[in-house]
Image: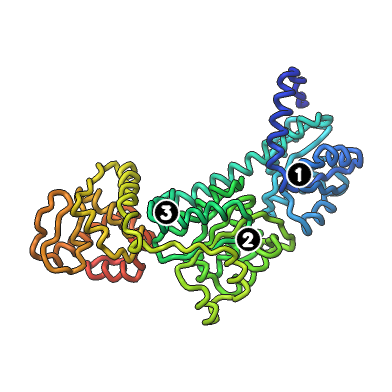
C-alpha cells in the first residue's frame, strides 16, 4: 500500500510553520547534518536548504562513504536515502544502531509502501519522508528530531537534578560580604571566562555557580558534576561520553556531560579530586573546545562555560604536586571566594527562614518559629558546617517540632534555652544530644532507603563517621 503525501496546507498555516521554523533554527547553529544520497541533485538541494541554518552540512553518495565521514566527524542528524548503491539505507541504519551510534536518522525514498515504512521505524529511523518533498516538510522533520534530542537531554539533566541534594536554589544573604560576592557574580556572569569558586564545605558554592549560569544568558543547561563522588576510572566517560564497547560494560554509546552542557555551563565541584591524567585532558578541552568520546576517533566541538569549585587551597595543592599548575591558572581566570557563615551572622536568620519555607513544603510539616533567644544562640554558634549545617538543623527542627538547641550549646556552662518556650534543658545534655542525633540520623537514613553514602551527604558528615555511629547502635550494612 503506497503512502500518501500530505495535502498542501493553507497559506496561513504555511506562514505559521515558516515563522516557527525560523525561530527553531536559532537553536540549530551547533548541529551537523550528513546527507547520504546517490543523486547529486538531491545532495545539492538539501545542502542549499540547510545552508546557514546548521553549523555544517556533510554529503556522501553511499552508505560506505557515509561511514567514512562518521569516522572523522560527529554528526547530529543523518538524512539517508533508502535506495543506495551497495548497502541500502535501511541496512546501514541497522548497522549504525547495532554499533550504538545515537545520531537521529530521517529516511528518504521515492518508492514507499507501508512495509518499508514499518521496517524503517523498527530499524531505528526517527522519521520517514516520501520523495518528492517540499523544503518545509524536511525542515519540520528536522525540527522534530532536534526537539526530541533537546527534550531527551533536558529530561536526563532533570533526573540528575532530582538525584542531587542541593542546599537551596537561590543565593540568600544580606550581609556586606555576600553583597560583594553577588556584585562580582553579576559582573562576571555574562563573560565566557572560566570561574573558580572557593570556600569551605557547605558555604553554597554550587548555588553561586547556578547564579552565574542564570545571569549569563546562556541558552544551554547547567550541568553539575562532583568530581570527588565519581570513581576515577569513570570520570572520563562521564565527561566525554563513550562508544559502544569502549570499555568493559559499555553495552551502548552514551553522550558525556560536556555534550549535555553544550551552550550552557558545566560545574565541576571538588575539582581538586580530579585525577592528574584527567586534569591534563580537561586542560586540553578548555583550550581547544573539542572533546573526543572514549573509543572513537572523531572530535566534537562544544561551547561550554566551565565553573569549578574547591574547598581546598589549590595553590597549596599545586605546590604539593597534586594539581597541575597550568590547569590551575586556566581555571583561576576569575576567583570568587564565599565567606564562611560564622563571619556573617546577619545572614543566619534569612537563611533559616528560607530553609524553613523550603523544607516545610517538602516535608509537609509546619514551620517552627524562631524566638529571640534562639536567634542569639544561632548567631553565636560557630557553624563549622556552614549553610549546610544550618539546613540540617532546620530539618531536625521541623521533624521534632522544636529546635534542638542543645546541639548549639557547644558544652557551655549554664542551662540551654529551648526554642519553643525558653525552658531549661534537661540535666543530662549528653544523653539528650545522643538521643536526638540518633533519631535524626536514622530518619535521614530511612528516607534514603538505607543508602549510607547519600545519607552521609545529606547529614554533612563523612561516610566513615556514619558507619561508625551505625556500628555503635548495632546496625550492620
Q: Is residue 149 visible?
A: yes
Question: Residue 301 location, x and y as percent?
Answer: 71, 56
Task: Using the rendered view, name the quadrant where residue 136 is placed.
Answer: top right
Relative horizontal placement of residue 146, taking residue 334 as reference (left or right): right
- Residues under labels 2 and 3: Cα distance? 24 Å
- Residues under labels 1 and 2: Cα distance? 23 Å
Q: Between 326 and 244, which is closer to the camera in this rendering?
A: 326
Q: Between 311 and 99, which is closer to the camera in this rendering?
A: 311
Task: Using the rendered view, name the quadrant where residue 267 is placed.
Answer: bottom right
Relative horizontal placement of residue 460, taking residue 206 as reference (left or right): left
| Residue drawn 34% across the image and 47% down it | 354
Residue at image mark 3: 166
Q: Which class describes the residues within 10 Å of circle 2: few (<14), some (14-19), or many (20+)?
A: many
| Residue drawn 50% across the image and 51% down it | 211
Residue at image mark 2: 240
Q: Between 476 and 283, which is closer to the camera in this rendering?
A: 283
Instruction: Tell me the tag on residue 358.
Output: none
Amino acid at each position: 500500500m503506497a503512502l500518501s503525501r500530505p495535502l498542501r496546507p493553507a497559506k496561513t498555516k504555511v506562514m505559521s510553520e515558516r515563522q516557527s521554523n525560523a525561530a527553531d533554527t536559532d537553536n540549530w547553529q551547533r548541529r551537523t547534518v550528513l546527507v547520504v544520497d546517490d543523486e547529486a541533485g538531491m545532495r545539492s538541494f538539501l545542502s542549499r536548504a540547510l545552508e546557514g541554518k546548521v553549523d555544517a552540512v556533510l554529503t556522501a553518495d553511499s552508505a560506505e562513504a557515509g561511514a567514512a565521514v562518521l569516522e572523522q566527524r560527529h554528526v547530529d542528524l543523518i538524512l539517508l536515502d533508502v535506495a543506495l548503491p551497495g548497502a541500502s539505507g535501511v541496512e546501514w541504519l541497522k548497522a549504525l544502531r547495532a554499533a550504538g551510534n545515537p545520531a537521529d536518522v530521517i529516511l528518504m525514498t521515492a518508492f514507499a509502501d507501508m512495509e518499508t515504512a514499518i521496517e524503517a521505524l523498527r530499524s531505528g529511523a526517527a522519521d520517514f519522508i516520501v520523495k518528492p518533498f517540499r523544503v518545509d516538510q524536511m525542515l519540520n522533520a528536522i525540527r522534530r528530531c532536534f526537539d526530541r534530542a533537546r527534550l531527551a537531554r533536558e529530561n536526563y539533566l532533570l533526573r540528575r537534578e532530582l538525584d542531587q541534594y542541593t542546599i537551596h536554589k537561590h543565593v540568600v544573604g544580606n550581609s556586606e560580604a555576600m553583597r560583594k560576592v553577588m556584585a562580582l557574580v553579576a559582573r562576571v556572569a555574562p563573560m565566557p571566562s572560566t570561574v573558580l569558586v572557593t570556600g569551605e564545605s557547605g558555604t553554597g558554592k554550587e548555588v553561586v555557580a547556578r547564579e552565574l549560569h542564570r545571569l549569563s544568558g546562556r541558552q544551554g543547561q547547567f550541568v553539575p558534576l562532583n568530581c570527588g563522588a565519581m570513581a576515577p576510572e569513570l570520570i572520563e566517560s562521564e565527561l566525554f561520553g563513550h562508544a559502544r564497547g569502549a570499555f568493559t560494560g559499555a553495552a551502548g554509546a552514551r553522550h558525556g556531560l560536556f555534550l549535555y552542557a553544550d551552550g550552557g555551563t558545566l560545574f565541576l565541584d571538588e575539582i581538586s579530586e580530579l585525577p592528574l591524567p584527567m586534569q591534563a585532558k580537561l586542560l586540553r578541552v578548555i583550550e581547544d573546545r573539542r572533546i573526543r568520546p572514549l573509543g572513537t576517533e572523531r572530535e566534537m566541538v562544544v561551547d561550554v562555560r566551565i565553573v569549578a569549585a574547591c574547598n581546598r587551597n589549590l595553590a597549596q595543592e599545586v605546590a604539593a604536586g597534586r594539581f597541575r599548575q597550568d590547569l590551575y591558572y586556566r581555571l583561576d581566570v576569575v576567583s570568587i571566594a564565599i565567606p564562611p557563615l560564622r563571619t556573617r551572622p546577619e545572614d543566619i536568620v534569612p537563611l533559616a527562614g528560607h530553609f524553613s519555607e523550603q523544607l516545610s513544603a517538602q516535608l509537609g510539616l509546619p514551620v517552627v518559629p524562631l524566638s529571640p533567644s534562639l536567634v542569639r544562640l544561632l548567631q553565636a554558634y560557630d557553624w563549622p558546617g556552614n549553610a549546610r549545617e544550618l539546613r540540617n538543623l532546620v530539618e531536625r527542627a521541623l521533624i521534632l517540632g522544636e529546635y534542638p538547641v542543645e546541639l548549639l550549646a557547644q558544652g557551655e556552662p549554664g542551662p540551654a534555652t529551648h526554642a519553643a518556650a525558653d525552658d531549661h534543658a534537661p540535666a543530662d545534655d549528653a544523653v539528650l544530644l545522643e538521643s536526638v542525633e540518633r533519631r535524626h540520623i536514622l530518619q535521614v537514613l530511612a528516607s534514603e532507603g538505607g543508602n549510607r553514602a547519600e545519607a552521609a551527604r545529606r547529614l554533612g558528615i563523612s561516610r566513615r563517621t556514619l558507619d561508625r555511629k551505625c556500628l555503635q547502635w548495632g546496625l550492620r550494612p
